Image (spheres, grey):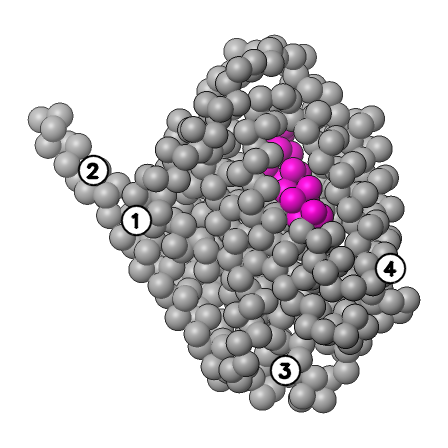
Amino acid sequence: MSALPLAAPETAQSSTATRPASAFPATTAAVVALVVTALFVLTQLYAAIPLIAPISADLGGDSTFALSTAFSLSYAIGFLIWGPLADQYGHRRVLMIGLAALAATTLGTALSSTLPALGTLRALQGFTAASFAPVALAYLAEAVHPRRRPLAIGAMSTAFLVAGVAGQVLASTVALAIGWPWVFGLSGAILVVCLGGVAVMLAEPQRPLRAGRLAQQFAALARVARMPRMLLLAVAHLTLLLGFVAMYTAVGPHVETLGLDAAQVIWLRLAGLPGMFAALAVGPLARRLGTDGVARLGFAIGAAGLVAEALLSASLVGIAATSLIYVVGVALAIPAMITLFGETAAPQRAGGMALNGFVLFLGASLGPLVAAIGVPFPALLSRLAGLALLAVLSLTVFARPRRDDATRAPQRVA
């Protein structure tokens, strides 16, 4: 996934080009440890999608908000907190603290016996999980040698995307076999192992602590959030995981009305997994279309997939095929959007990445609520397609200033 690293490593490469090779301490084993951890951290977000029904039945009420929205909203807010903290106090230190807290809250979630307890623990789980993605990407941008950096961050980013489908499948399989609490119990145990791997494998480059500058980190983030072009990106970005989570939340109950049981729904969810690897094409496409062009293409493909899925919603084969098209669009859009956030926020790229995560997962927190509004499945898909087209429009407006600057530049030189 060569496009995704552009948001952060450009700055890292320019500022570290003269550093000796020994100043990049991240080994292959360290990268593997982070990639595996990324998969299981993001699994905690997407596991909620197939677990809403069994947990609601077990705890005696609608678990949508407690299970899904509480996690996603806290996860989004956490991006705004953990990124500046890591820049201030060190990436490895924050990763260790965050993973330890995430493992503890995940194990605690397995013991939830009421919806209020579940909601509280899922909110804590979401906030602690947010310590991983922005900090791990920043670590790789700083600690991996520039020659290996695109591959390392590409592998990490692919793990984030694959978790969108794999998390649903793993949660469904475990819940059907031994019960939903074991989803969190086993995940907590795996996260403890991941914490050990990170502790052993990661070494942070030598750098001075930035004493007294934490407030400045948050002030820079606020300045980035007020940029007009950043707001245009945010409008588009908000729709991305909103649509993804809403579609997959609603598709399970819908296909059960068509005759699939819970075990068979797992295979339907797997249909979209190959589409995640479309992210690997973002780099070559960006060289032809521009990064904003790839983002628009992703949203347009996503809208087309949703419309086709609405038209074929009475066919299981049709749903499987069209959901794959939709996932391809999402997989193209996410890396391109992350790159655009980083480029637009420059030189405050850290703030841009934090804002990117906040907006993206704020949309994810709204997805289950949108899926629960009670409209028929085809109507829901049509509305989500409309949001994807709104994103295309917002990105079209976003791209105009840059094009105008490009056309005026030769005139100023002359």
Whichever of labels 2 and 4 marks the residue nearer the N terminus, that label is 4
CA separation, marks 2 and 1?
13 Å
Looking at the image, the residue that sits furthest to the right is 178
Q: Position of residue 112 (x, y in %)?
A: 81, 59
CA separation, marks 1 and 3?
36 Å
Residue 393 in sight from this viewpoint:
yes
So how many labels did they put on this image? Answer: 4
Report which residue position mark 3 lands on.
254
Amino acid type at mark 3:
His
CA separation, marks 2 and 4?
55 Å
**Left or right: where does residue 371 sit relative to residue 188?**
left
Q: Residues within 10 Å of mark 1 (few under 14, many from 20)?
A: some
Mark 3 vs mark 2: give the one in front.
Answer: 3
Amino acid type at mark 2:
Asp
Q: Position of residue 80 (x, y in %)?
A: 53, 38
Mark 2 vs mark 4: give the one in front.
Answer: 4
Figure quadrant of the N terminus: top right
Report which residue position mark 2 lands on.
405
3 and 2 marks in contact (CB < 8 Å): no
